[in-house]
Amino acid sequence: MRADNFSVRNVSRRWRCPKFIYTDSNTDSLLPDLEEKDGHVRDVATWQHLLVAADRYDLGRLRLMCEERLCEYIDLSTATTILALAEQHHCCRWKEACLEFLECPANLKKVIAIDGLDHLTVCCPSVLNDLIGKLVAL
């Protein structure tokens, strides 16, 4: 997901964005639910869009809430995309969780086999330096 794919209209249809922005309230009815249905997580993309909005409009608390939720859904197929998104939107907690996931040699080997790290070398080379630093520290 890239920032230019973000649409406030798409997010506000599924989430009451203005109410959160003006009241800073954190009720479960305001935030999308990441439920598993038939083994698939619903609304991960919505949380990613909210994270983009939180970064764009400097909503630190919302960004932290999004990071916390999204940390639970790092897997082999999303690790490199997550690293790039976390780097682009200054999500230290989410980035660190993803780097920890990739510290496991088995996970890193599978991620490289699935889609490689080419995307990261182009869009976020500093993330590769962070990953190498973590691996060297092992």
Image (spheres, rainbow, N blue to C red):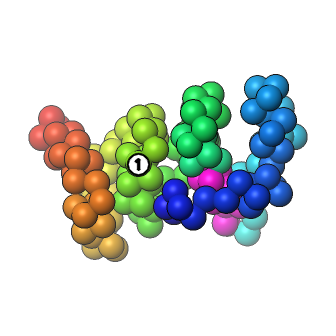
Does the image show residue 44?
no
Does the image show residue 80?
yes
**Direction from residue 21 to residue 115 in the image, left or right:** left
Check disc 1: other Cα within 10 Å, few if <14, some if 14-19, many if 20+.
some
Q: Residue at x 53, y 61 (%)?
A: 4
Q: Residue furthest right?
A: 29
Q: Check the picture and name the quadrant holding the C terminus.
A: top left
Q: Disc 1 designates what residue?
A: 88
Q: Nearer the viewer, residue 79 or 123?
A: 123
Q: Residue at x 57, y 48 (%)?
A: 52
**Direction from residue 29 to residue 99 in the image, left or right:** left
Q: Residue furthest bottom?
A: 114
Q: Residue at x 28, y 54 (%)?
A: 124
Q: Which range is magenta?
A: 39-49
Check disc 1 and give the amino acid type.
Gln
| Position above or below: 130 against 45 | above
Q: Position of residue 37 (x, y in %)?
A: 75, 64
| Position above or below: 61 against 101 | above
Q: Position of residue 129 (x, y in %)?
A: 18, 46
